[in-house]
Amino acid sequence: MVGKRKPKLAVWKFASCDGCQLCLLDCEDELLAVAGEIEIANFPEASHRVVKGPYDISFVEGSITTPHDAERIHKVRRASKFLVTIGACATAGGIQALRNFADVSEYTSIVYPSPEYIKTLNKSTPIADHVPVDFELRGCPINKYQLVEVLSAFLNGRKPNIPAYSVCMECKMRGIVCVMVARGIPCLGPVTQAGCGALCPSYDRGCYGCFGPKETPNTSALGEAWKRLNVEDRDIVRAFRGVNAYAEPFRKASEAYEK
Amino acid sequence: MTKRQENIAVLESEGLGYLVQALIDKGYEVLGPRIKDGAVTYDQIETVRDLPIGWTDRQEPGSYRLVKSGKKTYFDYAVGPHSWKKYLHPPETRLWEARRDEQGFTVIEPERETAKKALLGVRPCELQALAIQDTVFTGGPYLAPGYQERRSNLFIVAVNCVRPGGTCFCASMKTGPKATSGFDLALTEILESGRHYFVVEVGSASGEELLSDLPTKVADDAEKEAAAKAMERATAKMGRELDTKGIRELLYKCFDDPHWQTVADRCFSCGNCTMVCPTCFCVNVEDGTDLSGQQAERWSRWDSCFTRDFSYIHGGSIRFTVKARYRQWMTHKLAYWLDQFGTLGCVGCGRCITWCPAGIDITEEVRALRDKEQSEKVQSV
Ligand code: SF4
Ligand code: SF4
Ligand code: SF4
């Protein structure tokens, strides 16, 4: 593809821990190939060099938690042809969305000596609540192979192969013995989207739901199945209130068991 | 070494080690039952000590536990979460790859698997599942890539079920508990009055040949009788039952039954049932590229009728509701399959019952539909 301009990539950070961006840096073997195919135009975590927009593809990490960020995301959207949100913060509001179930002013008054300096929104919200998003890549953190897949798909004009089905599907494809059936360990796998390769069940633990709700998740049936394993309501609430607490099906499930 | 007059022999339990070794010596990779992560799974076997000696299992809808039996048996378990399809129809296979070059691109065919595999401990229901997948993958005008090669390099040691599991219903499906065909050798394990031995049936010339290398003797009447009795007891001890009488018509009649919704309320559409099912064969074919677009690959990966995207056609999924997915799955297994392949698609192994984390039981759901149908009939008279 001689003479073709390399597509420009930008990586943006909102309220987040940087873990998802680091997944891009963690693509050690693939990074050279990435650098060969795209121009990394804005990626503060990797380089100080900033190339002006517009950008062909933007990866957005983090959720919207401040009035300033609620403005800034529109600028990012305007400067980006294709916008991909990465990680649980950007796609669901992240762990910081636990504030959505509480009173933020109460928090700030406890944590900060002068809470009046804190300008924060009442809710932590996903990027898609503010601007149109072209693709959402789930996970806390994201899976680097899925990230490379999204990038390859974008560069080659094809649909990314990112399944929306359950963690159970990958769990079984890997031949892992189900921890819920064989050990009675509560697992969120049946309602969680695949992507991690069933990491936790492969280490004898239940799934924590890092990749958020799968397509058509039956959270109430899972709650009932957990109760049959003697899990108490408040622990069901806690399980759904993880990094994807504000993803609607998980939010509704935790609220249902809070009553 | 005794020359057998007929094809029923007896191998003392200590002789099982010779069987495994004979297979290894003939160049087979021996695959069989092994305990892993709290279940009997299928994996490579190097010696009989790898087998689940003294283990049995307790199976119920949505629950599986290994239990120590305190006996010296090798095969006192019922089927676990794995099935042999993982070797014959692997979870993922690269169908082909292509590389760009000056002429355009070159297609590279994958290397065909030629390794000889011996499957040790294939249950009668699993033999039927293999036969079903043979029909699916090689019965029509198009052959599934690689399947025939993998299949023709097999040596099958079946093991009859003297102790069916809590969710087994092969007797209803007429697929077990005794193997009738599709094996090279079939063993019935007998542990009675302190004597531990195998009654061995020969199912093929290669089975015959292998057996001639082993220290066997001709089975006497008492030993044959012991094996037959064990099978009778097993048939009487089935964990579950599924009445297949008029099943196709029943399911076609029940297409719009509200009962499907009550199942959907419990079902996670997680796909576990189809992943563990030894006959489920559906795959998704995925095209991928590398970053530079110089290389493309086509992969086949297990898929499930329980996923939304499985039925995605232009414009959306045609089975968006879980109700439609469960109905499709069960109706395919027990009705469409007959139209499509001439047999039922269920062999009664019970895996989908045990490994459903919601504990949904296909035999119960068929019964519920049948009962409703019956009572409606009564009412309309
Ligand atoms: S361990 Fe969890 S993810 Fe794996 S099959 Fe069981 S329920 Fe699903
Ligand atoms: S029947 Fe059970 S295993 Fe199958 S999709 Fe529904 S919940 Fe999952
Ligand atoms: S449908 Fe269930 S019982 Fe029938 S063969 Fe498949 S897993 Fe076994």
Image (cartoon, rainbow, N blue to C red):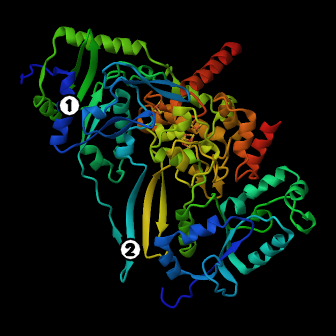
Q: Which residue is mark 1?
A: B17
Question: Which of B354 and B376 lies nearest the eye of the viewer?
Answer: B354
> Quadrant location of residue A144?
bottom right
**What's the residue type where badge 1 is placed?**
Gly
> Quadrant location of residue A175?
top left
Residue sitting at x 61%, y 33%: B358
For disc 1, the chain is B
Give the number of callouts: 2
**What's the residue type where badge 2 is placed?**
Arg
Residue sitting at x 30%, y 21%: B72
For disc 2, the chain is B
- Image quarter where the C terminus of chain A lies is top right
Quadrant of the image where one finds ligand 2: top right
Residue A48 screen position, x and y as percent = 64, 84
Q: Is residue B317 left or right of residue B276?
A: right
Q: Which residue is mark 2?
A: B99
